[in-house]
Image (tube, helix red, strand yellow):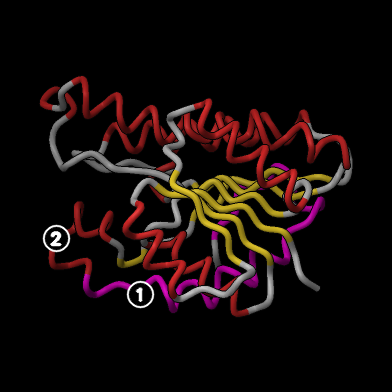
Amino acid sequence: MSRLILITGVSRGLGRALVNYFDADGHRVFGCGRSSQALDSLAGESSERVSLQSVDVRDDQAVAAWVESVIQQAGAPELLINNAAVINPNAPLWEIDAPTFDQVIDINIKGVQNVLRHALPAMVQQRRGVIVNLSSGWGRSTSPEVAPYCATKWAIEGLTQALAQELPEGMAAVPLNPGVIHTAMLESCFGAAANSYEEATNWAKRAAPFLLGLNSQHNGQSLSVP
């Protein structure tokens, strides 16, 4: 059965891989990202079921307009995946300047709330839908030199579990650890060693069916892609 899916951060990495899988599987997908060039490239390899828009999730007004247009066109999302995130360059916490720290916080936490603020009312009104906020292994453990990123993913765990307590019966909010995947973000942390990890396209073959299988019984559970 076709689902209406909303995904942030689809310009590259996990978000792009998910769009490709969901599209091939026959679902209606609305995605956003910051890179217009990357979105044009993704649109060129997607069917008419995929609608893409350049949106910076830090911009609440832009997010509001995007989500409103999605709801007007297709209705409330049935699966909402907050995937957009960035990581700081490897460095001790005291060496990370304010603009870098602000960007990680603003995209990884505030960006998620911006999307939820505008998408949830329509979903709650229908009393159905699954919200998946991408967490990380570093949302449940820590490593040196990525403290800002760890802080945001620990925040996503708490934010999502609290949200789960607020949702009406029939809905679910899940913080999801995707696992360690070869992406540009991983290259930022691991350098050449990132090449030894699974590619995003292969990951999506496992992750997308898992995401489609989430339902109200999973509400509030801190999960990982198997």
User: Going by the picture, which residue comes out furthest to the top?
Assistant: 98
Give yes or no for contact between labels 1 and 2 (Cβ–Cβ under 8 Å).
Answer: no
Disc 1: which residue: 198
Q: Is residue 219 magenta?
A: yes
The residue nearer to you, when weighing 154 against 122, is 122
User: Which residue is at 54% across, 37% downward?
Assistant: 157
Magenta part mainly helix, strand or loop?
helix
Quadrant occupied by the C terminus: bottom right
Q: Tell me the number on the disc at residue 68.
A: none
Please, what is the three-letter code of the amino acid marked with disc 2? Gly
The residue identified by callout 2 is 191
Real-space CA distance between mark 1 and mark 2, rounded to the nearest whole angstrom: 15 Å
Task: Tell whether 98 sits left or right of 116.
Answer: left
Which range of residues does the magenta coloring cover?
Answer: 195-224
Where is residue 11? Give x, y as percent. 39, 57
- Position of residue 211 measured from the top left corner of the image (x, y, whole percent): 64, 63
Compared to 167, does 216 lie above or below? below
Q: Position of residue 49 (x, y in %)?
A: 64, 69
Q: Is residue 76 left or right of residue 61?
A: right
Q: Around disc 1, counting alpha carbons within 10 Å, would you say few (fewer than 14), some (14 to 19), or many (20 or more)?
A: some
Residue depicted at x 45% and y 28%: 59
Q: Is residue 183 magenta?
A: no
Q: Relative to 50, does residue 130 appear above or below in the rendering? A: above
* Residue displayed at 30% across by 72% down: 197
**61 in relation to 135, above or below:** above
